[in-house]
Image: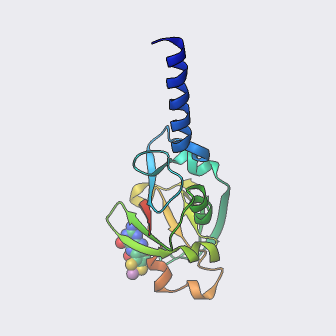
Amino acid sequence: MRKRHFLLAAGIALSLGSVFAGALGTPTGKVVLTITGKIGQTNSPQGAQFDMVMLEKLPQHSFTTLTPWGKKPIQFTGPLLRDVLAAVKAQGSVITAMALNDYQTSIPVEDAMKYDMVIAHKMNGQAIAVKTKGPLFIVYPFDAKPELRSATYYERSPWQLKSLTLK
Ligand SMILES: Nc1nc2c(c(=O)[nH]1)N[C@H]1C(S)=C(S)[C@@H](COP(=O)(O)O)O[C@H]1N2
Ligand SMILES: [Mo]
């Protein structure tokens, strides 16, 4: 290839790369979360893919709350769902969340704006094993608002989360 053509090709590859990756970066480790549907920022033909490091680089948020999943309060840590939605330039009004066990639930985008929901990757400071509802678990701060302590919100809290689709 002549030098001018090489530079042109390199330039096109660079600009295509930035259309995909943008501020999102690209996963180097195992993909743990894929976001598809009405989003303005992707980093792969499959949509926006995240490995654990990418989720850990976003601002982290922790809270401790009682849950329906145990008798003791649990501390959850992870990025705010609303920050993850912003990172992919999410549009639409409903999120369909899918879990590894094929559980599926709908979360209104408005919930993520109203409540400090996290995509937890740690429970009580420890990475969450798949058999203990990991590696990712969307949780509401159930103890922060009395209305959150209801089946409506428990059902919108998928553990073993694998993907989100914006509709
Ligand atoms: N991955 C996954 N998340 C899930 C579920 C499930 O089956 N799989 N069940 C949901 C429902 S219906 C409720 S009420 C709460 C509590 O479920 P549990 O009482 O079965 O633990 O978790 C929600 N999150
Ligand atoms: Mo449920």
Q: Nearer the viewer, residue 29 or 108?
A: 108
Q: Residue at x 56, y 54 (%)?
A: 126
Q: Residue furthest left?
A: 102
Classify residue 21 by image quadrant.
Answer: top right
Can residue 133 be seen here?
no
Image spot of residue 163 (x, y percent):
42, 59
Q: Is 16 above or below relative to 104?
A: above
Image spot of residue 97 (x, y percent):
42, 67
Q: Nearer the viewer, residue 14 or 76?
A: 14
Quadrant in which the N terminus appears: top left
How many numbered markers are drawn? Answer: 0
**Left of 81 or right of it: where is 161?**
left
Image spot of residue 150 (x, y percent):
51, 86
Image spot of residue 57 (x, y percent):
63, 48
Q: Residue at x 49, y 45 (%)?
A: 43
Can residue 92 be seen here?
yes
